[in-house]
Amino acid sequence: GPITGVNKEIAVLQCHGDCDPLVPLMFGALTVEKLKSMINPANVTFRTYSGMMHSSCIEEMMDIKQFIDKHLPPVD
């Protein structure tokens, strides 16, 4: 269904490798544009990683950590 209320303000981090052979970068770019049309586009971040395939890298993990630290409360 449609996204309403507080959910329209959710923060989203989408990460994608520019060498992904399974999910081409073009599909990541299309997905992020669809997300921006559904929620506040200012809250959508799309990061690409040079040379990364369908996997992860240290830079991506650091970006995810920063995103979590910024948007989620600390765990005691």
Image: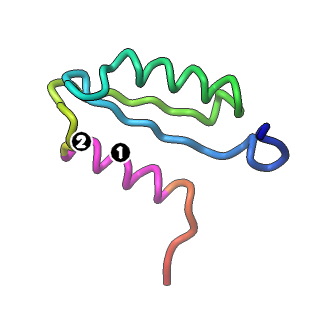
Q: Nearer the viewer, residue 22 or 58?
A: 22
Count of numbered circles on the image: 2
Residues shaded magenta: 58-69
Mark 2: give few (<14), some (14-19) or many (20+) Cα within 10 Å: few
| Residue extending farthest left | 51
Q: Quadrant of residue 37?
A: top right
Amino acid type, callout 1: Asp
- What's the residue at 22%, 43% (across, down)? 56
Check residue 56 for magenta coloring: no
Q: Position of residue 4 (x, y in %)?
A: 82, 42
**Dot label at residue 63:** 1
- What's the residue at 20%, 41% (across, down)? 55
Left or right: residue 6 compared with residue 28: right
Amino acid type, callout 2: Glu
Q: Position of residue 12 (x, y in %)?
A: 55, 41
Viewport quadrant of the N terminus: top right
Left or right: residue 49 compared with residue 47: left
What is the C-alpha distance between the residues marked 2 and 1?
Answer: 6 Å
Disc 2 and disc 1 in contact, CB within 8 angstroms: yes
Secondary structure of the residue carrying tag 2 is: helix
Q: Is residue 62 above or below residue 35?
A: below
- What's the residue at 25%, 22% (across, down)? 18
| Residue extending farthest top | 26
Q: Position of residue 71 (x, y in %)?
A: 56, 55
- What's the residue at 37%, 36% (across, down)? 15
- Majority secondary structure of magenta residues: helix
Residue on which the image places disc 2: 59
Q: Nearer the viewer, residue 75 or 36?
A: 36
Secondary structure of the residue carrying tag 1 is: helix
| Residue extending farthest bottom | 76
Q: Quadrant of residue 33?
A: top right
Left or right: residue 59 compared with residue 38: left
